[in-house]
Image: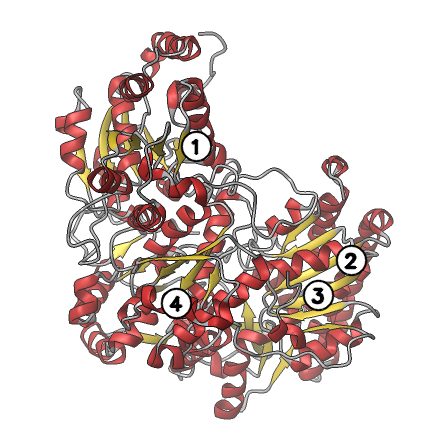
Amino acid sequence: MERIIKERSTQVHTIGTSAHDLDCEKKSLAGSVSQRACVFCGSRVVLYPIADALHLIHGPIGCAAYTWDIRGALSSGPQLHRLSFSTDLRERDVVFGGEPKLYTALTELIEAYKPKAAFVYSTCIVGVIGDDVEAVCRKVAAEQKIDVLPVMAEGFKGTKKDGYKAACDALSKLVGTDNNFQAPPFSINILGDFNLAGELWMLKEYYEKIGVNIITCLTGDGRIDEIRQAHKASINVVQCSGSMMHLAKEMEEKYDIPFIKVSYFGIEDMADALYEVAGFFKNEEMLQKAKELVSEEIKTLLPALEPFKEKLQGKKAAIYVGGAFKAISLVKALRLIGMKTVMVGSQTGNKDDYNLLQKLCDKETIIVDDSNPNELSEFVKEKGVDLFIGGVKERPIAYKLGIGFCDHNHERKEALAGFEGMLNFANEVYASVTSPVWKFFKR
Amino acid sequence: MEKIPTLSYIRPFVSTRNACKLCSPLGACIAIKGIEGCVPVIHGSQGCATYIRRYLISHYKEPVDIASSNFSEETTIFGGEANLKIALTNVTNQYQPKAIGVATTCLSETIGEDVASQLSHIRNDSTNSNLPSLFTVSTPSYQGTHLDGFHATVLALVKNFAKKLPSADKINFFPGFVSPSDIRHIKEIVADFDLKTTILPDYSDTLDNPVWDQYYRVPKGGTPISELEKMAEAYASIELGVFTSVKQGGQNGGKEISGASWLESEHSVKNHQCILPIGMNGNDALFDILSKVSGKDIPVKYQMQRGRLLDSYADGHKYIFGKKAVIYGEEDLVLGLCSFLDEIGVEVVLAASGANSGKLQKKIIKHCPEHGKTIQVISDSDFEQINEACNTIKPDFLIGNSKGNYIATNFNIPLIRVGFPIHDRIGGQRITLLGYQGTQKLFDKVVNAMIEYKQNNSPIGYKYM
């Protein structure tokens, strides 16, 4: 039996032993049982949290059904995004074309739900039967007098990453459409935070405390009118770089807004995220406030983490998540509570991400791109890990083998960002690793 | 924070709002997981396989490996055979399966892939000598629901594997789309009638395994292919469910058939069909069939279970009489539940399904003598239709899968979780509905939900009854 499929051997690297650099940003191999999804998925998960928009999926029912209310992204106001709308194409639509159905569906939904804008996602089959989604969107936009934004997300057109780009393309049509707005001083946008379990609200509080204003977050707790004003910010602070880099670069080009890449996960990265913003504004008072905030938070957090660290010292972890930037933060956060990462991988990392991981991790650590259940199960078994961090698809691999597991994907219900989040994370890791139930398992 | 918007008025919609169904390849994958050593491959984009995996994992809480032929733009233009071949080779080398089932998608169907002939090309290519048994099923997601995919796969399996052999001392059992624990209970029942049985599909183990000492790439369990091959020689079939026929375009010559009815018409294996045995009437019908087929009386064990269920009907009837219920889900599940609730005095006010066979209403009238004629039936329904209907019908509880939870929250009424998917609780794979025993668990759950509701909404609650 193959441990690693031959064509995939360049996408697995052991620090200090294998000769090659890690290969990445490739299409998944047919039959490899990749954990990745498709272009549509990429665009859907990015745009999902925009709460006052209508999200209509143009295609047969599956694409809409499998993404209905899929994220743990919270909205402080409207909840329209949590409904799953689909044109639910049938055979006759496929034969005669889906445009009339799309037109009717869009019109009736906009009339009934009165959204601020509508996103229309084009799926595999729509690309094949050649519906002119853009034309229908234009027509309905003119009739209903709202923005109707096509998201060209045919599943076969690339990987999940191409879906991120399709989402950014749709967003960039909204950005810059409200020029009357006057931004307050020290305004930023957060790019690539999805307000999972209300994390954005914690971040907002930190930024407010140091005197920074957030114009909009793309796309956590998102609102159409705020996105229109995003070009008035002084800087874009990018958290999930995998998904939002396109938009950040485009806004830099078009509106001369610089961007920085940050992470809100773990003490170090969270503190840096605040310092870098203060540094950008070259504001001493802001920097001072940031330092005070961090030291205040750490004063209570570090002692609170101590008991967890004692119990977790020397335990081994494996990480397999969607974005590699998240994996980098996780390695650091685990180190903070005494744990060592022995395997780390992602679905969509790039060369820079993986180089950084290689520098950050110890010798013998396995780094893997676009993995599958067979490899992952081999790696965790071989390395004798105590904890696996991943998403729903990785969870049963850990549990079947009697290994602790933590969710760190877009569906999670626990806030893990910021200082509060770090304590939640430590708590969850502790509960997962030291539960007495593992004593019944043979490992 | 606002509420999830619900329209207070009912108007017709062309669009589907919160689907009460899933797509056809998902059902195909579940049936394929019920075959021993078999790995599903979805012929289409990577996303279809991953989404379906994710969905099944969250219900069954088990590893569910489904491969994809992973279409690219190039594949979509020039055809998928080359990708399929790579996929089959990689799956074979990684999993060493006994069989691979290839389910199509909207994408591969629409570009006109002839998978059956592709499989024979790939099979005849001498470089692929180590390939296992291969079969395919047509499951375009724009046709029908996940149940159509499920039943189409069952049909494809018998057509592919069942051979005409001398008759044997065995029966076939088609349980339909029920839970792994339901299948285990069925196995127990047929064994107690001393019947030798082939269950198709049997995912009672593959989708509900114990913990592992090592990682099994293909989980243990499933209908052995050697047994599947003998299904044409069985002396009878028992089929649970009456919505099992597949009406898939020209593929079956336009005829509507199920796996069991195909065996009857092609190989004269007498089929005994009944509705999902939930409730006294449903189970009496099944046990009659078992008795007739086996030539044996109903074992004392089941007479006792039946007696206990009836005894509990007396204990609990008051708390549920006249309560109004909304049921939703697959047509066979809805019918089984309707029949059960009707016989215990609950008034089903709405029976909804995302499927649309055109026969649900008629079957409900037939199997629900108390209220059948007044039950509002919505076919091709979605959750927002149910949600809006609840504004006027004011039900006391909902019964169906996890997806209706937001409606129950909206109206502050209990949701009795049954069926698929249950992914906001653990144990979805262990919910038994079938048999007197399964019905017993469900009956207790319904009665207790009503009692709990009353307790929680009383200023003092109560202790004795």
> Mark 4 is on which residue type?
Gly
> Mark 3 is on which residue type?
Val
Relative side of A197 to B383, left or right: right
The answer to which of marks 4 and 1 sits earlier in the sequence is 4
Look at mark 2 in the image and give the residue it sits on: A383
Question: In front: mark 2 or mark 3?
Answer: 2
Where, by quadrant of the figure, is residue A283 drawn?
bottom right
- In the rendered view of the protein, which quadrant contains the N terminus of chain A? bottom right
Question: In front: mark 4 or mark 3?
Answer: 4
The disc at residue B44 is: 4
- For the residues tagged 4 and 1, is the chain the same? yes
Color theme of the render: secondary structure
Look at mark 3 in the image and give the residue it sits on: A344
Look at mark 1 in the image and give the residue it sits on: B183
Q: Position of residue A13 (x, y in %)?
A: 73, 73
Name the residue: 22% across, 60% down: A90
Name the residue: 83% across, 75% down: A16
Answer few, some or many: residues within 10 Å of disc 4's Cα (few below 14, many 20 plus, some between 14 and 19).
Answer: many
Question: In the rendered image of this protein, does residue B396 appear above or below residue B424?
Answer: above
Q: Look at the numbered disc 2 and give the secondary structure of its residue.
A: helix
Q: CA distance from mark 4 to mark 2?
A: 35 Å
Name the residue: 25% across, 49% down: B7
